[in-house]
Image (tube, grey):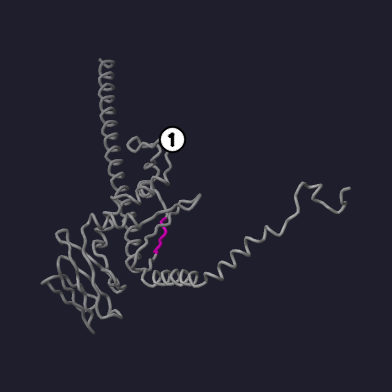
Amino acid sequence: MADPLDISSDTGVSPRTGTEYTGIVEYLAMARRRWPIILVVVLLSAGYTLNSLRTERPQFRSRATVRLVDPSRAMAGNMADRSTNAEMPFSAGADPIQSQLQILQSEAVVSTAVDLSGLRVFPADNHPFVSQITDVDVSATAGNGSLDLAFGATSYTVGSGTQTGTAAYGASAEAGGVRITVASRPAIAATKLNVISKQDAMARILSDFKAVNRPKTDVIDVGYVGFDPNQATRVTNAMAQAYQVYNTTSAQQFSRRRRAFLEQQVRQADSVLSAANSVLISFRSVRMS
């Protein structure tokens, strides 16, 4: 006769036995016997983690916000309506926001940023790019190399190989085809910068630069990740400025093309009007005669 209190007969589940718990007991007993090995493994893992945290260089992210506008409409009014402009066709499925994102991350904009802000100059390893450097201009003929900056009480010195330039704070000093302006004395005594090729600078920026559109808006968040916070801020601001310059230049070119098109239409209308007037004059002369 079945036990009415035995629910296993109704559920089809067999009652648990003590053998199900023996596995855990055996593992604990093995751990007690092998505790020196386990302790060594834990200590090695902790040491490796701490050493990685101590030696790994921190990375810094700089962000800026860009709002998309139609500069051609702002400069030329409704006459610059891109949707009806035959010179700038768009497919029906084109996403203008994604198109601007591609432009923002294009080599054309990066090239402009490198030229505008002297981004061929990067801080050397373990040397900061001090925030007191307010302007960097790199000559097109400047070669790859390094710049040694020393900051004195009232002036600073820029050295590149055998060339040296000295200037008071707030003025520019030049060496090796690079002109640098330091606004005030930094807290450190010296730093070192590297001058790389334009292509290397563009590749480095593109690899760590990101642009993301905020959903359902015309706002884009741009950011750059680097090992130096001031350099990261410098690159981010330069990319935002270069994008504005690119849009302004494109709008000016569009406006010039539009003006040339309208002038051509006016000349054609004048020709048609002149021809119509000639026909009218001839017609009146015939009737009067």
Specify the segment rendered in magenta: 61-66
Q: Is residue 276 one of those drawn in magenta? A: no
Q: Quadrant of the C terminus?
A: top left
Nearest to the observer: residue 204 or residue 90: 204
Taking the view exactly as shown, the residue that stands out farthest to the left is 162
173 lies above or below 236: below
54 lies above or below 248: below
Q: Position of residue 137 (x, y in %)?
A: 21, 64
> What's the amino acid at mark 1?
Ala
What secondary structure characterizes most of the magenta part? strand
Q: Secondary structure at mark 1?
A: loop
87 lies above or below 38: above
Q: How many marks?
A: 1
Question: In the rendered view, does 139 fall on the left or right side of 241?
Answer: left
What residue is at 26 percent from the left and 22 percent from the top?
281
Q: Which residue is mark 1?
A: 92
Q: Position of residue 18 (x, y in %)?
A: 71, 60
What residue is at 19 percent from the left and 68 percent from the top?
146
Q: Position of residue 280 (x, y in %)?
A: 29, 22
Nearest to the observer: residue 275 or residue 242: 242
Q: Quadrant of residue 157?
A: bottom left
Question: In the rendered view, does 206 fall on the left or right side of 40?
Answer: left
181 lies above or below 264: below
What residue is at 89 percent from the left and 47 percent from the top?
1
Q: Position of residue 179 (x, y in %)?
A: 19, 68
Query: Badge 1 local density, few (<14 within 10 Å), some, or many (20+)?
Result: few
Q: Quadrant of residue 86?
A: top left
Nearest to the observer: residue 69 or residue 265: 69
